[in-house]
Image (cartoon, rainbow, N blue to C red):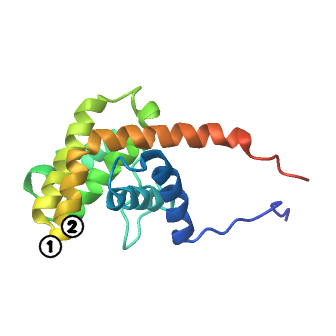
Amino acid sequence: MDELPFVVDFTSTDTLNFFFQFLRDDVRGILPQDQVIYTASVLAHYAQTSCQTTSDHHLPTPQNLSETHDRYVLGRVLFESTDAELLEFAGAEILLLAGFFRDQMARRHNLPYFEGLGQKFYARASCHSPTQKQRQLLGDMARNFPVWTQICRRLNHSMRDARYLLPPLSS
């Protein structure tokens, strides 16, 4: 069996720090650090969650906004659920897809509509969250949702452009 030239083993903390550093540099002084950490944790979570399988702790990462819409809007979660965690997952999925993968999603989806859904999911999650701190953070994410989708889009572009700056693998 051929071995890969190198293996990089990233922990969850490494992945979180990776996204946090990119986001922190982009929004320094513009948005509060708790929102930066939260957004980095959303991106890190989905970077480590498969699109194909489910586990006891994670729903599969949706491949497009239609899947999210079907799961949470047609499934009536937006209108009927009081489960703050489920509502937050819905908002996070939309943040990932309408933000980080915005360019890909724009070809098929009405992004302003989904930004509105993301705001609604975070606002509802805020209303049903168990702690004041969590209610405040999720409420802030709802208010700043369009800003965060644009920041995540810029992050995607920065990361895509940075790949050309990496040195080639040696044989």
Residue denoted by label 2? 134
Amino acid found under the numbered disc labelled 2: Gln
- Residue 49 is situated, as x and y percent measured from the top left of the image, at 47, 61
| Quarter where residue 63 is shown | top left
Query: In the image, what residue occupies the spot 70% across and 65% down?
Result: 8
- The amino acid sitting under disc 1 is Pro
Q: Return the residue nearer the eye: 74 or 151.
A: 151
Q: Residues within 10 Å of mark 2 (few under 14, many from 20)?
A: some
Residue 130: numbered disc: 1
Q: Secondary structure at mark 2?
A: helix
- When the figure is inspected, residue 144 is found, relative to residue 51, above or below; the finding is above
Inspect this view and state whether residue 98 appears. no
Q: Quadrant of the N terminus?
A: bottom right
Which one is closest to the eye, mark 1 or mark 2?
2
Residue at 41% x, 54% y: name it. 61
SS at badge 1: loop
Percent x, y of residue 64: 39, 41
Q: Is residue 48 above or below residue 98?
A: below
Residue 114 screen position, x and y as percent: 26, 37
Nearer to the camera, 75 or 123: 123
Q: Residue at x 54, y 36 (%)?
A: 157
**Label 2 near label 1: C-beta < 8 Å?**
yes
Quarter holding residue 105: top left
Q: Is residue 126 left or right of residue 155?
A: left
| Residue at the far right in the pictured view | 171
CA neighbours of label 1 inside 10 A, class few (<14), some (14 to 19), many (20+): few
Vertical side of 79 occupied by 105: above or below = above
Position of 106 with respect to 80 (left or right) is right
How far across and down, in percent of the image, does residue 53 sit? 45, 61
